[in-house]
Image (cartoon, rainbow, N blue to C red):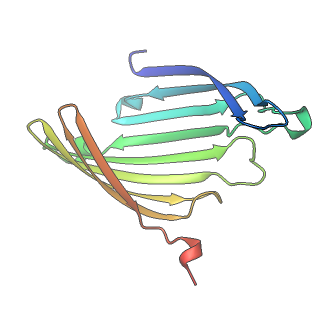
Amino acid sequence: WDRVDLGVNLKVVQFRQSCRGQCLDAGVTATTYAVDAGLQIDDVLGLPLRLGAMVANAGPRFQVRNEEQADPLPTRVRAGAAYEVSGQLMANEELSLLLTAEVEERWRNREIDAPALYLGSEFGASVEDAVLLVRAGYVIGNGEQVDGAAVGVGLKYTRFDLSIAKSLAANIADVS
């Protein structure tokens, strides 16, 4: 069980709208709860492979006035895999290469939206206490995201971590 990690989080979600000055009502408050849960398994089948699955924002509908107008929480289900290629191909411990794949589905709107697929890679080069990272990825969206690539760079030095990324996807509004 030392290769398995499990996490559960319970959270209270509250919407509050208050009014100052001349108001017809004192404001609106609505409260619900949500649960996040995840599972991660390392070194699957003795390989440098990590598998994970999670559900986020699972809970009852968010009700402000009555049940007819209640809104569902934005529940998401995700499953992913990460494979550390560098241990298989490179003997150099200062260099690393990680490949990832992840699928995300909106739990409440499964009949409307297809799952989104995320593919990514991360190349790292270590020098003493510093690690330089170069990242690239691609998303095949589910209607919410724009399909396309993204790139990024990162720097880790002891406890300091700085990353920046840029989406290369064309915005639909920009295309004419």
Going 70% across and 35% down the picture, which residue do you hit? Answer: 20
Quarter that holds the N terminus:
top left
Looking at the image, the residue that sits furthest to the front is: 22
Q: Which of 11 and 133 is in front in this view?
A: 11
Q: Is residue 45 left or right of residue 20?
A: left
Looking at the image, the residue that sits furthest to the bottom is: 176
Q: Which of 135 and 45 is in front in this view?
A: 135
**Residue 36, above or below 81:** above
Q: In this view, does 49 lie to the left or right of 87?
A: right
Going 39% across and 28% down the picture, which residue do you hit? Answer: 42
Going 55% across and 53% down the picture, which residue do you hit? Answer: 117
Residue 138: which quarter of the image?
A: bottom left
**Residue 35, above or below 47:** above
Looking at the image, the residue that sits furthest to the top is: 1
**Residue 41, above or below 161:** above
Q: Is residue 173 left or right of residue 151?
A: right
Quarter that holds the C terminus:
bottom right
Going 61% across and 22% down the picture, which residue do you hit? Answer: 11
Number of marks drawn: 0
Q: Position of residue 78 (x, y in %)?
A: 57, 40
Q: Position of residue 155 (x, y in %)?
A: 22, 46
Q: Position of residue 14 (x, y in %)?
A: 68, 28
Q: Where is residue 52 in the image (x, y as percent from the top left)?
A: 49, 33
Residue 134: which quarter of the image?
A: bottom left
